């Protein structure tokens, strides 16, 4: 299964869970229309927590360490440098020397 689909729904559940908890906190501490021990506030914290947990579990269902992207052929030749794609002009490139001393370690 493609990882993007569960990650999308997991992120959506995380977002809605945060909105539900935030709305409950807003009603208690900003508007003052609910008390911290009222049933709607407790239920909003509980339901928001369940949504957050479900979204977190859905996003972490596929372990990223086991994900291996399509490997490119490592034996390919290096492509030649395309001066038209460079942010530095051709006249500035002419004065620079290529440094191949980096060995990748």
Image (tube, grey):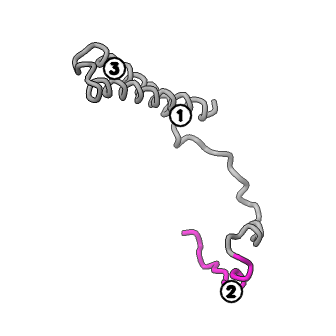
Q: According to the image, label 1 marks what residue? A: 62
| 38 left or right of 18 in image | left
Q: In the image, is 74 to the left or to the right of 22?
A: right
Is residue 68 in the magenta section?
no
Of the residues under marks 1 and 2, which one precedes in the sequence? 1
The span shown in magenta is 89-105
Q: Residue at x 43, y 23 (%)?
A: 51
The answer to the question of whether label 1 and label 2 lie on touching residues, with beta carbons closer than 8 A, is no
Q: Which residue is mark 3?
A: 46
Does dot 2 land on a helix, a strand or a loop? loop
Q: Earlier in the sequence, mark 3 or mark 2?
A: 3
Which badge, 3 or 1, is on the more N-terminal residue?
A: 3
Of residues 35 and 13, the one drawn nearer to the viewer in this rendering: 35
Quarter of the picture holding the N terminus: top right
Number of residues whose C-alpha sits closer than 10 Å to that of mark 3, classed few (under 14), some (14–19) or many (20 or more): some
Residue, far bottom: 95
Looking at the image, which residue sits at the far top?
A: 39
Q: Residues within 10 Å of mark 2 (few under 14, many from 20)?
A: few
Q: Residues within 10 Å of mark 1 (few under 14, many from 20)?
A: some
- Residue at 51% in and 29% down: 12
In the image, which disc is placed on residue 27? none
Q: Residue at x 73, y 67 (%)?
A: 85
Give the x, y percent position of residue 45: 33, 22
Give the residue pinned by disc 2: 95
């Amino acid at each position: 299964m493609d990882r993007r689909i569960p990650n999308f729904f997991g992120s959506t559940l995380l977002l809605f869970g945060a909105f539900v908890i935030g709305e409950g906190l807003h009603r208690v501490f900003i508007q003052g229309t609910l008390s911290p021990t009222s049933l709607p506030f407790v239920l909003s914290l509980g339901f928001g927590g369940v949504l957050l947990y479900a979204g977190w579990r859905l996003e972490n269902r596929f372990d990223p360490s086991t994900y291996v992207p399509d490997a490119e052929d490592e034996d390919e030749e290096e492509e030649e440098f395309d001066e038209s794609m460079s942010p530095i002009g051709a006249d500035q490139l002419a004065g620079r020397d290529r440094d191949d001393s980096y060995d990748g370690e």
